[in-house]
Image: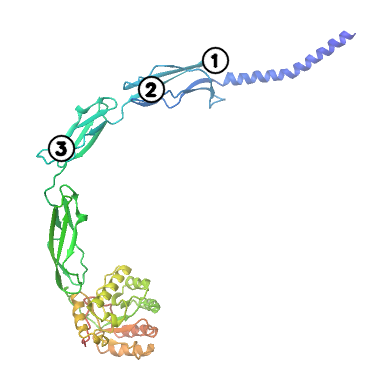
Amino acid sequence: MRRDNAGSKSGKIWLVILAVLLPVIMLSAAAYLLLFGYNRFSLELELLGGEQLTLEYGEHYSEPGCRVLLRGSVFFTSGVELNSPVEISGMVNEDKLGKYALDYQASYMGLEANKTRLVRVADTSCPVITLVPDAPGLQPAPVYQEAGFSAWDNYDGDITARVVRTEEEGKILYSVVDSSGNSTSVQREIPVFDQYPPELTLLGGEELRLPLGMDFVDPGYTAYDKKDGDLTSQVTVEIDHPFVRYSADTYQLTYRVCDSEGNETAASRTLTTVPSTRPVIIYPKSKTIYLTFDDGPCPDTGRLLDLLKRYNVRATFFVVDTGYPELMRRIVNEGHSIGIHSCSHEYAHIYSGADAFFEDVFALQELILDTTGVETWLLRFPGGSSNTISRRNHGIMTELTQAVEACGFSYFDWNVDSDDAGEAKTAGTVFRNVVDGVQENTYSVVLQHDIHSYSVDAVERIILWGQSNGYQFLPLETDSPVMHHRVLN
């Protein structure tokens, strides 16, 4: 009875074990079938460094190696690297140019892989040409005596015999090509024993004429020496006496250049300054008012510009260096004329002499040009050409009025004075003074000052009155009718 019970129990245990293992076995079989039945494997070789390599002649070939990959069509598609041996057949002759094939073979579980690498041994290095230096203290000779040269190539060896030597003016060119087509060129400067001075050429000619008022800018020159080459930067220029822009004169300019051997060349030219040609005056065909404003720009100038723009009226501004560059630009950009009044407006200084006056004028002209892009040739003397403040310097206004016109400036006084710098202290008085004065002239140059707000306040009434009475408003130009006072000094 005991043995029967034991057998019964043992049988039950095996049934349990079988019940547990049977699904595992079935799953394993299915997995094996899926992995090896449907997933097709292949063996691949991946050549490190690529399938084509170039080896420079003279270098040692070092095998980059390869990877063996087992790749599946469904699973392991990226490949699994195997530690399988790879057989390499073939060799690379590092000492001979050419192409060499290396064959790679690997096997694993009945699978095989093959690859071929192509290694090219090439010569890409250029040959070297060495020049023998010229002997120290080489003396002049009718024909240059070659000091010597050699050429060496890393593959061909000594190729001096292949060097092509070409002699040109002042130099010799050496060139060579090796058997692989690599080329090299070097140059030797032929020693020059210079007994000849440089060539000095004056651009613009030897006789120059310059209108007064224009600043002298040298038209240029060139200097060349057979040995030293371009010597233009070493040319020195001397003028026989200081250049004056406002006074007619004749100047001698001397140009000198010296080469490294001490050979010198000199050239000279004459500069003559002459009075500028006066423009032909164009008189207006109808009643005209030229509104002019002195001593600005200032904050009220902006308000005045707004008003002129509203009525589409153009005026003329004789400016001072008051520090309002943006208003200077507005004057020009909105179609008004801009003229020179004074840079400093210091009567005692600017009328102390012609040098001081023109220094002031040219400084303001340059400031206006830099600020607005306009080079103006309109001018109004501080106090007018009839001013009496300048009398402490006898005859100065006679000299200056002639000089500014010779320099190309058109200077304008006025024939209608608003008296806004005198007793007129209200807009109404300014308006009445202008209207009364305008009615006495065919064309009127009106003097106002935009630094006085009451004078600016009168401008709208002046414009409306002028337009309703058939007047046109124009800005002054260099060819506008000049209005000159009688010079009192």
Residue located at (80% from left, 15% from top): 13
* Residue wearing tag 3: 167
Q: Quadrant of the C terminus?
A: bottom left
Q: Earlier in the sequence, mark 2 or mark 1?
A: 1
Nearer the camera: disc 3 or disc 2: 3
The Cα–Cα distance between marks 2 and 1, rounded to whole angstroms, is 28 Å
The Cα–Cα distance between marks 1 and 3, rounded to whole angstroms, is 73 Å
Residue located at (75% from left, 18% from top): 19
Give the SS element for disc 2. strand
In the image, residue 27 above or below residue 235: above
User: For the residue carrying disc 1, how many other residues have a C-alpha within 10 Å: few (<14), some (14-19), or many (20+)?
Assistant: few
Give the SS element for disc 1. loop
- Identify the image quadrant of residue 444: bottom left
Nearer the camera: disc 1 or disc 3: 3
In the image, residue 425 above or below residue 41: below
Question: What amino acid is at disc 1?
Answer: Met
Q: Quadrant of the N terminus?
A: top right
- Identify the image quadrant of residue 97: top left
* Residue wearing tag 1: 109
Question: What amino acid is at disc 3?
Answer: Glu
Q: Earlier in the sequence, mark 1 or mark 3?
A: 1
Residue located at (39% from left, 25% from top): 52
User: For the residue carrying disc 2, how many other residues have a C-alpha within 10 Å: few (<14), some (14-19), or many (20+)?
Assistant: some
Measured as percent of width and height from the top left, residue 82 is found at 54, 21
Nearer the camera: disc 2 or disc 1: 2
In this view, the residue in front, 397 or 378, is 397
Q: Earlier in the sequence, mark 3 or mark 2?
A: 2
Measured as percent of width and height from the top left, residue 180 is found at 27, 27
Residue 83 seen: yes
* Residue wearing tag 2: 118
- Identify the image quadrant of residue 143: top left
